[in-house]
């Protein structure tokens, strides 16, 4: 399976992520989660279609 590209939804989120120290447990956890999603895009919980907001 081809690795997926992961992008931040909001620029402010990306900036906040970049400000975290390398040793921060939150950043380590996020990096681990991003790698898991890149390897398998179906990892994690399933969300019912009716719970996903529609774009206007």
Image (cartoon, rainbow, N blue to C red):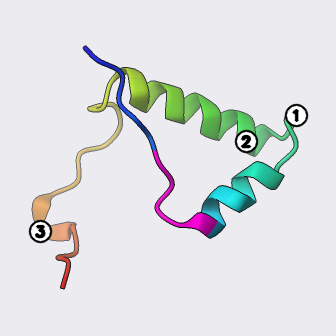
Q: Are marks 3 and 2 in contact (CB under 8 Å)?
A: no
Residue span colored magenta? 7-11
Q: Which residue is mark 2?
A: 27
Image quadrant occupied by the C terminus? bottom left
Vertical position of residue 22 compared to residue 35: above or below: below
Q: Secondary structure at mark 2?
A: helix
Residue in the foreground of this view, choosing between 2 and 40? 2
Mark 3 or mark 2, which is nearer to you?
Answer: 2
Q: Position of residue 33 (x, y in %)?
A: 53, 34
Vertically, is 7 above or below 39? below
Q: CA distance from mark 3 to mark 2?
A: 31 Å
Q: Are marks 2 and 1 in contact (CB under 8 Å)?
A: yes
Mark 3 / mark 2, whichever is N-terminal: 2
What residue is shown at x 88% (from left), y 43% (from top)?
21
Please state which of residues 19 and 40 is positioned toward the viewer in this rendering.
Answer: 19
Give percent across and percent down for residue 16.
73, 60
Q: Label 1: how many residues lie within 10 Å, few (<14), some (14-19) or many (20+)?
A: few
Q: Residue at x 23, y 54 (%)?
A: 47
Residue 52, position as x, y percentages in the image: 21, 67
- In the orientation shown, which residue stands out farthest toward the bottom? 56
Q: Which residue is mark 3?
A: 50
Within 10 angstroms of label 2, few (less than 14), some, or many (20 or more) residues? some
């Amino acid at each position: 399976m081809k690795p997926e590209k992961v992008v931040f939804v909001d620029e402010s989120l990306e900036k906040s992520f970049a400000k975290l120290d390398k040793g921060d447990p939150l950043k380590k956890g996020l990096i681990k989660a991003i790698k898991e999603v890149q390897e398998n895009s179906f990892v994690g919980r399933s969300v019912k279609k009716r719970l996903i907001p529609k774009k206007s």
